[in-house]
Amino acid sequence: MRRLFAVDGLACAGCARGLQRRLSELPGMTQARVHYLTGSALLDWNEDRQNRDGIATAVRQAGYRLIDRHSPEDLIQRLDAQMKTIAIRLAIAVLAGMWSMALAIVLYTSRLDGQTAWWLAAASGVFVFPVLWAGRGILWMGWKSLQLREPTMDLLVSVGASGATILSVFALAQGRSEVWFDAAAMLVTLLLLARLIDLRGRRSALVALLAMQDAAPDMALVQTGVVRRTMPAAQVPVDAIVIVDAGATITVDGVVLQGQSLLNRAVLTGESCPVPVGPGERVDAGSINLDRRLTLRVDRESGDREIDRLGGSVALEIARGGAETGLAERCAAIVSKIIPLAALVTLLLELAHGESAEAALVTALTVLVGMCPCALALAVPLVRMHTAKMAVQQGWRIREPQAFERLATVDSVVFDKTGTLTKGQPSFESVNPEDGFTCKMVLDCAALAETGLSHPLARAITATTGEQGAGGLRGDRHAEASDSQGRHIRVSSAATLIGDATTLQVTRDGMLLGRLVFADQLLPETKIVLTQLWRHGLRLHVASGDAAGPTKRVGAALGIDPDCVISEQTPRQKAELIRKLGDQTVFVGDGVNDAPALAASACGIAVASAHPSARSTADVVIEHGGIDRLPQIFAMARRARYIGQTNLVLAVIYNAGLLPLLVLGHAGPGTAAIAMAASSLSVTANAARMQIASANPG
């Protein structure tokens, strides 16, 4: 049994990982993927050994609630409310924490008499308590991570902030001014900021699903007997008769009862070339009726349309990713186990050496706070902040930082064809006249028939020749007109293709004048960009919903291995291809039909001309330009990963170097505070190298 559920109450990515582990351990559970950003759980289980009630009970015992499905709209409303709450708490933490840290700086940098220093330390403590109130949810999430056996940054920060506060209060009670309130304030404030960014990421993931719904308009013209009325597509029942005028977008899935026309199905296939339809053939919501009025009989209700199923595919692909663990999170999990253990060992050693319980406790708390993970908490977020800023400056946007960082290690890139590698519109390429006729004669005759008609091939012809005559007439799968001498001109699909390209034949009074060849032209930068990516060791693939001929033609022009050029791919087949190639595969696309593949890939990249659903689903969105930005994006990902790893090493070296001094009692609170500040400054300076690299690309 496979089901996609919603999970109510997930507060952090660590909670999702812990719940995923707990569900995976249930009897009969073959696969469990809990995705924090969308609050979803994709579960596979053996119904002979497990049932839904048992799964719901396990989720409830973990502190959450399993429900069938949230609507994206409801979830977005909840997230908006949470974001508002977190934003208010962050503002309180910043305002109060700023004063707490300012007073601490005075203590660190000034020579003060004991009484003045004590009062400044106490004032710093007064300002830290609003920060702790604002971040009280962090303590709860840290406790939840313990219950789920998944130590997280929440637990690490909870331990550090709580220890710093307890030790500081203890020091004030003894009349000393060596306090750590500023460390507690900084840790809580940073994590609140990270939580707000996380919520924005969750919201954008849900917007991707809503964009799938927006790909088809809401209203349909329904005919009952001789009466026609407009009604929301969601209310149109199966077997209803719907009228779709020429130029309108189809809002229902159904079968053609009357009429013949051409459809633009780019929203589903990515290919903009018109597709002929007639009685008995199926049409899908989101397609554009180019030619003549169609009468349809609805065969799928709203929610079960192909466009809705495509949205469901996106939800499945997002959920299939499950709960991931980044390098910073893995380090946090390890350090969060080491720090309390080191403090406990210190306490026992101090007592064993005859120290008083009070002195032993102070030394243990000093270890706990001295190893406070300020540098570790800053290590990756600072790099992400600089990278995001540079990305905006260079014309692209990072929607999911963790996915962007995976670009540094991927080995394959799959490209959509139409609109990504090519211009997305057919253009006139060549004319092949029959003996006795000239190229100009064939083109002028074709323009007579195609002038005034609105479809891609007609526009391609008139863009070459200019409009001719008063306008042609669109017939059943052809265009026609009469020339100045009354001869009948007809343009129709050619029975014989030329070089696997889209081909039209032009006749006059039934005599073949010649054939016109059309192709979707490669974008000017395509060859250069793909060559650069290939030189970096990436395997390149093309996956298109277009026919075999045009797709192979593009692959051959780019020098891509024919086995890596795949045509006639449905949206689901594209996503399956991504999974087949492995979890180190990037997908680059632009259409609604690309959304499942973008969600399934290690990092989905949408170009500037992409449909809103593709832009919302992609992890990286190119705002200005096309694939010419890809080498720059890959290079920045590699640099960000390197600097992030360097920061983590610096943070770990700080903890490893300070631990023996703290345990042996050779470093007091003042020394530890200076070391902690130096560590934080080191990772801050290292992260700034991202900006330096951007300013000096050479």
Image (cartoon, grey):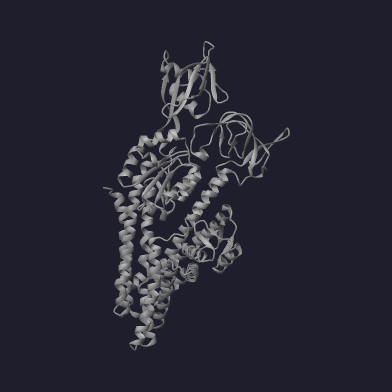
Q: Position of residue 2 (x, y in %)?
A: 56, 56
Along the viewing direction, whichever of 178 and 380 lies nearer the viewer? 380
- Across and down, in percent, residue 555 comes to 38, 37
Whether residue 468 is visible, yes or no, is no
- Residue 495 visible to an observer of this rendering: yes
Instruction: Kindly indicate the quadrant of the structure image that contains residue 653.
Output: bottom left
Image position of 144 (left or right of 533): right
Q: Across the whole image, how many numbered discs are drawn on residues?
A: 0
Q: Residue at x 60, y 57 (%)?
A: 68
User: Is 81 situated above or below 179?
Assistant: above
Residue 529, percent across and down? 34, 41
Q: Residue furthest left?
A: 698
Question: At 34% from the left edge and 56% from the top edge, which residue is drawn?
Answer: 641
**Residue 69, image quadrant:** bottom right
Decide which of 35, 219 is in the foreground and name it. 35
Name the foreground residue: 145 vs 433.
433
29 relative to 530 in the view: left or right: right
Q: In the current view of this chain or complex, which residue is farthest to the front?
A: 48
The answer to which quarter of the image holds residue 324 is: bottom left
Query: Please, is residue 318 above or below residue 302 in the view?
Result: below
Camera-side residue of 164 and 53: 53
Image location (x, y in percent) of residue 560: 36, 39
Where does the N terminus fall, quadrant-wise?
A: bottom right
